Image (tube, rainbow, N blue to C red):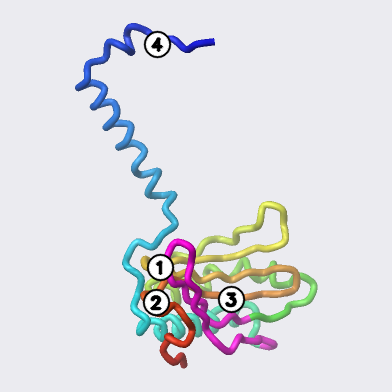
Amino acid sequence: MTERTSGRERGLRPARRLAAAALTLGALAPLAACGSSGPQEAPPAAGDVPAYEVARQDVLAAVQQVVGADGWAQDDDASATAQDDGRCVVFLPDASTTRAGGEGYDLLADVPDALAPVLDEHGFGKPSGVEEAEHGGTASVTAVDAAGWEVRVTADGDVVRLDMSGPVDLDPCAASALPELA
């Protein structure tokens, strides 16, 4: 079956077609901007990573006020990984604890309110509410700054985890090129 166009559609003048196209693009542009997952600014310099580590420590302290400070384990080192799109992403040390009986899920509900002032102090956006995975399992609270750095607190089973990562202008993109962290 072939598709026919009406004489009305064929009869549009070029100026009207351009105007219609411009209106369509203008209407779609905000939607495209909302779907963008990339950073809004250039990636921070490698020298900014220690400030992100300070932010991570402050966020951890706020999470510990909600979840409890006992039993937290932290990775020792930050890492840097080159992404397929050419970005260099730094992963600060994760921190995690175990809360038996899924208690972490219940406590996660109070995390956004506890994080909001700390994230604001460090230039991050407002934390999300608790977002649950479509098929269960993991629940998380996230926040992102203008440079594309993300803070995420997750509850998965008995484990509550804090991780923080983001793009950095780092050459070479390797942990050995990162400045010392406190």
User: Which mark is nearer the camera, 4 or 2?
Assistant: 4
Q: Which mark is residue 5?
A: 4
Identify whether 167 is placed above or below 74. Answer: above
Label 1 Cα neighbours within 10 Å, binned few <14 / some 14-19 / many ≥20: some
| C-beta proximity under 8 Å, tags 3 and 1 | no
Residue underneath mark 3: 162
Residue type beneath disc 1 = Asp
Disc 2 crowd, CA 10 A, few/some/many (<14, 14-19, 20+): some
First along the sequence among labels 2 and 1: 2
Reading the chain from its start, which is encountered first: label 4 or label 2? 4
Displayed quadrant of residue 119? bottom left
The reply to whether dot 4 and dot 1 touch (C-beta < 8 Å) is no
- In the image, residue 86 above or below residue 15: below
Looking at the rendered image, the disc whose residue lies closer to the viewer, 2 or 3, is 3
Of labels 3 and 1, earlier in sequence is 1
Give amino acid for label 3.
Leu
Q: Amino acid at mark 2?
A: His
* SS at badge 4: loop
- Quadrant in the rendering for residue 30: top left
Question: Which span of residues is magenta-colored?
Answer: 70-95
Q: Position of residue 129 (x, y in %)?
A: 55, 60
Between 104 and 87, the residue placed more toward the observer is 87
Report the amino acid beneath label 4: Thr
Q: CA distance from mark 2 to mark 3?
A: 16 Å
Residue 92 magenta-highlighted: yes
Residue most extreme to the right: 101
Q: Residue at x 63, y 69 (%)?
A: 154
Percent position of residue 76, x then y: 58, 89
Q: CA distance from mark 3 to mark 1?
A: 16 Å
Distance Cα–Cα, label 4 vs label 2 = 56 Å
